[in-house]
Amino acid sequence: MSGGARKPLVRALDVRKSFGETAVLRGVDLEVQRGEVLCIIGPSGSGKSTFLRCINQLETYQAGRIYIGDDLIGYRESGNRLLPLPSRQVVLQRRHIGMVFQQFNLFWHMTVLENIVEAPIRVLGQPLAQAREQAMRLLDRVGMTAKANAYPMKLSGGQQQRAAIARALAMNPELMLFDEPTSALDPETTGEVLAVISELASSGMTMIIVTHEMGFARQVADRVVLMEEGQIRHEAAPEQFFGDKAPARLKAFLSTIH
Amino acid sequence: MGFDWAFFFDRIVNPGAPYLNALVRTVTMAVLAMVLGLLIGLVVGFGRLSRYGVIRAACAFYVWLIRGIPVLVLLVMLFSGMAAAGLFRFSDIELLGLKLTASFQAAVIGLAIHEGAYMAEIVRNGVQAVALGQVEAARSLGMSSWQVTWRIVIPQATRVIVPPFGNDFNHMLKTTSLASVIGVQEIFLLTEAMSATTFKSFELLTVVALNYLVLTAIWNTIQGVIETRLRAHEIDRPVRTWWQSLVVYLSPTPGSAERRA
Ligand SMILES: Nc1ncnc2c1ncn2[C@@H]1O[C@H](COP(=O)(O)OP(=O)(O)O)[C@@H](O)[C@H]1O
Ligand SMILES: [Mg+2]
């Protein structure tokens, strides 16, 4: 291990997960440094979503380790065995990991503003005034100030996704996970969401982004990894990853996308 | 002979204290049975979504059993059947200065047991209708399962549950007439008793039919206003007060009409 300053924020070690008989994650090894933007690409069904969901404990992994900083996610180590954490602690671990979903998942019965202040007030106990002030700053950042009091059903997909990003940011996450944030959007609104994510990337936020937008990955990522059959198969800086010297298998996959 | 209009209108204008009491009893019975039925429905409905197989099975059995028994049979079984078998006998009680007769208690409980089985399905559908994605988003923000249930699932499930709940209450207002069989002095039993002495049964039955109609019409309006408020996020006009909700509900704007249809 190198010195403390280089200690990664995320460390996944031989992470494994099956649904019944199907092994979906077959030993994922991955590190993400603080402030790094990592893009994960790979064929559908290769386990990208499952891996993100394990980091955020929407799924539980069955073997291996995931560390965020010094915290072992979801388990406590006892000798060589992993004992599941009680849900109270799972909830605490999730607080500072933001997640953005393909389907936005805004709370349908709340306005955009209510969506954003909900968790800061209920989970962090922020006073309403403070939570609103922060929410308005975030809405300004994602270009949604005008829609603060709109209900999600009145918004376009791109607007919903930008609101969902603001909602995740309101919890002051140290890590943001994006699971195909633009896959449900039409081409016109994809750009506005990618612009928001790019801005976030340049602000120094640590992010893991699953995406099929290769141009975007190339521009925003510090590192790109290829996931196949539940494993990280290739890993490189974007210039190499998308460059001419990439391995044949990777080129083959990339050619299926464009 | 023919329809005695004078008698008919007199019954409407001067119903008399016994009839008004019976009317209060009808409404009280329906409301109490509905509230209890909702409680049963919440327990059984969430029970059907329990992570424990035994609880799921027990709740499914309850729904299956009760939905297969006619309410009338259920009421008589509770009131007379159990007493005859020496299992349980309802007796009159005093509650907060109000006298609750044995038959009234049996009727409320029987109707609630019946309603509970239907409410359980309504509750289950409502909870399942809340998109899993929103629940996951709430969890990913660090909300506890309790917070997710109260802040996300229940408010949204309520929107799905209210319309069928309202329809059930509409039914319930009329189903209370079955309680006449076990001797609850509600409007239908009273009407029958009066028919026997006046021989004007058609006029009297028309009055009681109108009465049920008015009750359900009032309820339908209340239900419409509640639903309008719950749909605030889909309506472009303000519905912040009950009055505004009533206006929106009654006005034939395309939005509200299409939802009411
Ligand atoms: N809840 C689940 N139950 C069973 N199988 C699942 C579940 N979630 C995902 N899978 C399976 O796991 C595999 C990987 O899925 P996923 O992680 O969503 O892949 P990706 O995001 O890379 O497309 C797929 O074969 C999928 O069918
Ligand atoms: Mg996926």
Image (tube, rainbow, N blue to C red):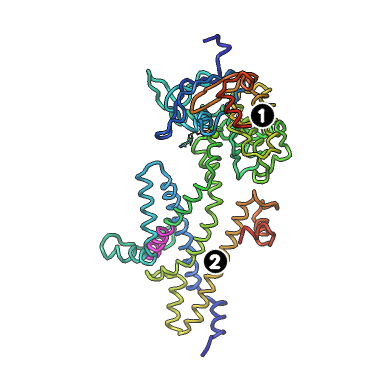
Residue receiving disc 1? A197
Above or below, A34 against B189 in this view is above
- Image coordinates of residue B11 in percent, x first then y, are 53, 79
Q: Chain of mark 1?
A: A
Query: Is residue B111 shown in magenta?
Result: yes
The extreme top residue here reads: A3
* Direction from residue B57 to residue A199 in the image, left or right: right
The extreme bottom residue here reads: B1
Q: Residue at x 68, y 24 (%)?
A: A219
Dot 1 alpha-carbon crowd within 10 angstroms: few under 14, some 14 to 19, many 20 or more: many
Front residue (pair B129, B15): B129
Q: From which residue to which does the magenta span run?
A: B101-115
Residue receiving disc 2? B216
Q: Mark 1 vs mark 2: tell me if same chain.
A: no
Query: Is residue B81 shown in magenta?
Result: no
Above or below, B78 against A52 in this view is below
> SS at mark 2?
helix
* Direction from residue A182 to residue B77 in the image, left or right: left
> SS at mark 1?
helix
